[in-house]
Image: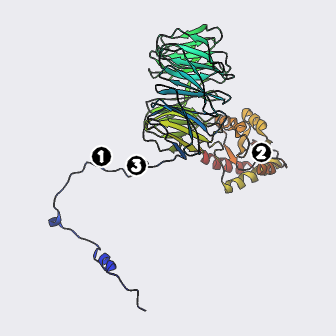
């Protein structure tokens, strides 16, 4: 049988087979420095964009991003183009421009009920907006120079702002009325906030001091300054959820913990306090994220970056921390292991601000490149999650443990076994709603050096536990004479591999 007709192109390709050169064919030699050659191990992802939504309404660099605490899609941004915007994730180009500032919009903050938005500008003004419509409500005046930060009282519509003119101001946003001012700092007030209980104000300044105030009387309760406290201006502060501690960071590269009640401080060797655990995260231009154990003032994990860290955010009550960096990347870190588990690319310049959406599904970053970018599924709360085959093995062993009286059902009972040191491993259901009610278990298990794992179904976990109702967590307990000892050890080894 004859083959198909060959084309001229085919014949030309045949002629372009192997080519042999000898020394006479060499025209010239060019020296190449090895450093100029690409590294085979380089991960060049400059062209990658992991964003699921990009907001491009600004014409200058972005300074600040704030997500609504009640609407998971609503975001506010402000920047060097003297503009603020309200926009929604996933809704295309829809945006409400916030007109009124005559200089850069330096800071933004939503009220705790999500009804109002405050914007601060380098024009010295604080503007109040209706968060749902973007309509202007009022202008709050007082400071003579630019606004550095703005915060809301946790239980009402009182607004607090710090200024470059060394002062701090408080207003009633509903009435547009001045309430109090706090003076005493000797340089720009660079950071500040109400404590979570609303009873105290903490402010930090370029004068290297922290001041603690009574918001009602305006009394300066404590001044924290002088050696061995910071020797240079404060850049940021964060407050613990129980309103007892302030953590301050400075240009001198040091971090201190201050007891708000006494004014005393300790030294830790951009900052954000974990909502429920005694941990803090610090990031700096030294390219490091450090997770701190506040109870012992010791580092728990150090996470190395390729460039300086500009902003840090805990992902709600989880074990994960997000960092924004000079290289334009957002990175997600496991605070227990110190591992980088996700990296998000897309920005062409340094990230200036990070904010987490109300439902914790989205992380929004603002950059010097003039854009705000949103990435999704940033919070792998149910981690590690067993695959289908491992789930079968886990549920089978849980069922056997129930038969041998080596099982405790429920999150409270699992917690007790961990605290008593009798847990072999802990199993949790990934479809628990809200999952936050379980997230203390991985932290406690890690502290006790006990393996833990998630399975996909609380109903299936309930059946394995021998009940007809869903079970959100269980703990297989220790029994030295158990016939399950070998199986338990094998499964523990398999679970621990997921955590490496």
The residue closer to the viewer here, 353 or 316, is 353
Front: mark 2 or 3: 3
Figure check: 264 above or below 476: above
Label located before the other in sequence (3 or 1): 1
Q: How far is disc 2 from disc 1 in space, using C-alphas?
A: 62 Å
* Residue 261 falls left or right of residue 480: left
Instruction: Residue 481: give its label.
Output: 2
Q: Quadrant of the C terminus?
A: top right
Q: Residues within 10 Å of mark 2 (few under 14, many from 20)?
A: few
Label located before the other in sequence (2 or 1): 1
Residue 452 visible (yes or no): yes
* Residue 469 falls left or right of residue 454: right
Image quadrant in which you'd find residue 349 = top left
Q: How far is disc 3 from disc 1 in space, using C-alphas?
A: 13 Å
Image quadrant in which you'd find residue 179 = top right
Q: Position of residue 374 (x, y in %)?
A: 55, 42
Name the residue that disc number 1 marks.
Answer: 35
| Residue under the image location 57 percent in, 42 percent down | 94
Name the residue that disc number 3 marks.
Answer: 42
């Amino acid at each position: 049988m004859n083959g198909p007709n060959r084309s001229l192109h085919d014949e030309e390709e045949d002629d372009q087979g192997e080519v042999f050169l000898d020394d006479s064919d060499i025209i010239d030699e060019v020296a190449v420095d090895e450093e100029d050659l690409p590294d085979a191990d380089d991960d060049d992802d400059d062209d990658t964009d992991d964003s699921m939504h990009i907001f491009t309404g600004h014409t200058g660099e972005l300074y600040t991003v704030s997500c609504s605490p009640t609407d998971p899609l609503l975001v506010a941004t402000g920047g060097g183009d003297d503009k603020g915007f309200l926009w929604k994730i996933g809704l295309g180009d829809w945006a409400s421009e916030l007109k009124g500032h005559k200089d850069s919009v330096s800071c933004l903050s939503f009220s705790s009920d999500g009804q109002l938005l405050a914007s601060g500008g380098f024009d010295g003004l604080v503007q109040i907006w209706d968060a749902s419509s973007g309509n202007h409500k009022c202008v709050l005046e007082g400071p003579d120079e630019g606004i550095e930060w703005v915060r809301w009282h946790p239980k009402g519509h009182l607004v607090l702002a710090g200024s470059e003119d060394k002062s701090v101001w408080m207003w009633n946003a509903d009435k547009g009325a001045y309430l109090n001012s706090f003076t005493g700092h000797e340089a720009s007030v660079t950071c500040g906030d109400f404590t979570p209980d609303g009873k105290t104000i903490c402010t930090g300044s370029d004068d290297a001091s922290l001041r603690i105030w009574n918001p009602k009387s305006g009394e300066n309760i404590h001044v924290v300054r002088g050696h061995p406290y910071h020797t240079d201006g404060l850049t940021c502060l964060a407050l613990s959820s129980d309103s007892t501690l302030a953590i301050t960071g400075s240009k001198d590269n040091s971090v201190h913990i201050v007891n708000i009640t006494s004014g005393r401080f300790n030294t830790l060797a951009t900052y954000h306090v974990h909502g429920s655990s005694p941990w803090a995260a610090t990031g700096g231009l030294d390219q490091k994220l450090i997770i701190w154990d506040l109870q012992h003032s010791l580092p728990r994990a150090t996470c190395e970056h390729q460039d300086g860290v500009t902003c840090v955010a805990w992902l709600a009550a989880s074990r994960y921390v997000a960092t924004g960096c000079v290289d334009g990347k957002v990175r997600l870190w496991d605070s227990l292991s110190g591992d980088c588990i996700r990296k998000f690319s897309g920005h062409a310049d340094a990230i200036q601000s990070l904010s987490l959406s109300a439902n914790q599904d989205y992380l929004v970053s603002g950059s010097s490149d003039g854009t705000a970018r949103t990435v999704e599924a940033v919070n792998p709360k149910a981690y590690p999650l067993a695959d289908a085959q491992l789930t079968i093995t886990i549920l089978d062993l849980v069922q056997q443990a129930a038969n041998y009286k080596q099982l405790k059902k429920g999150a409270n009972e699992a917690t007790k076994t961990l605290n008593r040191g009798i847990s072999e491993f802990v199993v949790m259901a990934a479809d628990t709603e809200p999952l936050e009610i379980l997230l203390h278990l991985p932290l406690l298990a890690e502290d006790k050096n006990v393996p833990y794992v998630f399975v996909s179904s609380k109903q299936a976990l309930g059946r394995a536990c021998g009940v007809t109702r869903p079970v959100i967590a269980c703990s297989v307990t220790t029994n030295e004479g158990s016939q399950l000892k070998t199986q338990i050890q094998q499964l523990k080894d398999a679970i621990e591999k997921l955590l490496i």
